[in-house]
Image (cartoon, helix red, strand yellow):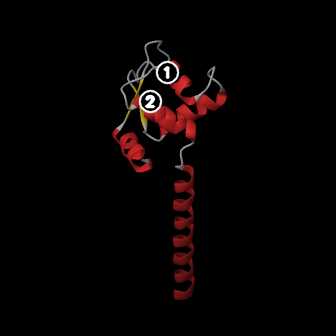
Amino acid sequence: MRTITSVAMAKGAQDEAQDEAQDEAQDELTVRERAMLSTCAEGPKNGQALLKAAGYAARTGNFKRSLERLLDGSLLAMTLPDRPTSRQQKYRLTEKGVRRLAERR
């Protein structure tokens, strides 16, 4: 009985370590995502400013995914969260985003 329990515990620890390593790998920011964060370090920016900083000419799927990833990771936040599609929407750097930028420098 103890053997099964210890094997299950070891398996659980291995799974947890693997999940943690996967999360760290997914936390790596792309060059474009870092550029978007750096731009917001100067103050809240609109979508066009983020597009320009990331080097995109239009709101492509890649840009939208990067922005969503930064929002989901709490690195950026909307200034008007109750109106996500507002033309006055801007994005600001969060405390977590500030720490992430500081780690990279």
The mark tally for this picture is 2
Query: Does the rendering let one see residue 1?
Result: no
The x and y percentages for residue 37 are: 45, 35
Q: Residue at x 48, y 12 (%)?
A: 87
User: In the displayed structure, would residue 43 be above or below residue 37?
Assistant: above
Kind of residue at badge 2: Thr
- Binning the other alpha carbons within 10 Å of mark 2 as few (below 14), some (14 to 19) or many (20 upward) gives many
- Binning the other alpha carbons within 10 Å of mark 1 as few (below 14), some (14 to 19) or many (20 upward) gives some
Q: Which label sits on residue 39? A: 2
Label 1: which secondary element:
helix
User: In the displayed structure, would residue 103 be above or below residue 54?
Assistant: below
The furthest residue to the bottom: 2
Query: Does the rendering let one see residue 42?
Result: yes
User: In the displayed structure, would residue 10 be above or below residue 84?
Assistant: below
The x and y percentages for residue 8 are: 56, 76
Q: Taking 75 as reference, is 19 left or right?
A: right
Q: Which label sits on residue 57? A: none
The x and y percentages for residue 96 are: 37, 43
Residue 54, quarter of picture: top right
Work out whether mark 2 precedes mark 1 in sequence or the reverse, and give the earlier one.
2
Residue toward you, 17 or 42: 42
The furthest residue to the right: 61
Q: Taking 99 as reference, is 69 left or right?
A: right
Residue toward you, 99 or 68: 99
The answer to whether marks 2 and 1 mark residues whose Cβ atoms lie closer than 8 Å is yes
Q: Residue at x 61, y 22 (%)?
A: 59
Q: Quadrant of the N terminus?
A: bottom right
The x and y percentages for residue 18 are: 57, 64
Q: Residue at x 57, y 57 (%)?
A: 22
Q: Taking 75 as reference, is 14 left or right?
A: right
Which residue corresponds to mark 1? 49
